[in-house]
Amino acid sequence: MEDTMDLQQLASAVCEVARCAGRFIRQEREKFSLEAVERKHAHDYVSYVDKQSEQQIVAALCTLLPEAGFITEEGMAGYADEQYCWVVDPLDGTTNFLHRFAPYAVSIGLLKGKEMQVGVVYEICADECFFAWKGGGAYVQTAQAAPVALHVSNQSMADALVCLQLPYNSDAYNPVVRQLIKRLYGRVASVRMIGSAAMALCYVAAGRLDAYAEKYIGRWDYTAGALIVLEAGGQVTTYEGSPDFILSDNVVATNGIVHQEMVEEVRSALLHTDC
């Protein structure tokens, strides 16, 4: 596992695990009924699709790295301080999935302690698999085409396309995102909300977005995508600007050029709302 080639091979294998789960999700969406939806919290949904996808992913990853623990959104596997830990979101963008609204994705990251080793995000609607391994760069692959290397954009703040997500903790975050929109709208090229943290990160890595910020999210939402951004030449920190974000509930990810400005905007929004 210390060898770069081992990580590359592992990333390739994890891509297949993510694609397999994605095929299951795609098939189930065709016959899915909203009656199967469960409410975890206000506006936070789950269904048998999330749970069965997670079961499939956990079983497959156990064969790839039996000694690893798990941190998963649906809690179907555990972590007991193992050296390696898989961080899994079996369906990131569940609300999008329920509404047949792209994007939604499978997200799988591997940690060694607090160090990210492998990140894979498979976007189901577009059949795009984004992946990276530590020190190996970041890539995207569609269908049977060869992987294409990713690199973040070189846009400045005035021309930046910025993603500001709306997490489920609306009472706490509503005043913050209002401040952010007020500060950014008209100053940047435009603001978007896409409903999937994993995909927002991948779009930053691919240069489709220039900056992204979100709070009140889980490690399964950002671990894989954060590595992909970093390996694509971008920057990822907490809202306070710390690069030690892996235990945080918030991230700012950018092309690097606009990062300091984005962090300053986020800090200012927090100060004005006491969040």
Image (spheres, rainbow, N blue to C red):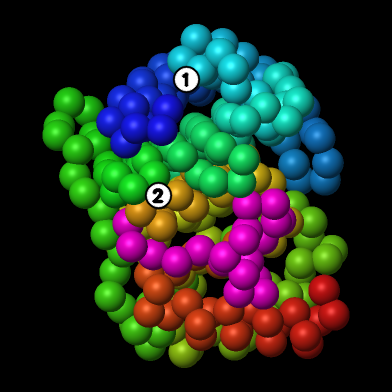
Residue placed most toward the observer, 14 or 115: 115
When asked about the image quadrant of residue 165, the answer is: bottom right
Real-space Cα distance between discs 2 and 1? 20 Å
Say whether residue 163 is magenta: no
| Vertical relation: 194 (above or below) 43 | below
The answer to whether 261 is drawn above or below residue 154 in the figure is below
In depth, the one of 100 and 137 nearer the eye is 137
Residue at 21 percent across and 49 percent down: it is 149
- Position of residue 91 relative to residue 134, above or below, is above
Q: Which mark is residue 198?
A: none
Report whether residue 65 is seen: yes
For the N terminus, the quadrant is top left
| Image position of 201 (left or right of 137) | right
Amino acid type at circle 1 is Ala
Residue in view at x 70 percent, y 52 percent: 247
Disc 1: which residue: 21
**View extreme (front): residue:** 2
Assign a secondary structure to mark 1: helix
Q: Look at 64% across and 78% down and name the residue there.
A: 266
* Residue 10 sits above or below residue 154 on the image: above
Q: Residues within 10 Å of mark 2 (few under 14, many from 20)?
A: many
Residue 55, picture quadrant: top right
Percent of width and height locating residue 107: 51, 36
In the shown orientation, is residue 90 left or right of residue 27?
Answer: right
For the record, the magenta segment spans: 232-250
Q: Position of residue 253 (x, y in %)?
A: 49, 65
Rendered-image quadrant of the C terminus = bottom right
Residue at numbered disc 2? 228
Kindly identify the amino acid type of the residue bearing the numbered disc 2.
Ile
Dominant SS type (magenta): loop
Mark 2 lies on a secondary structure that is helix
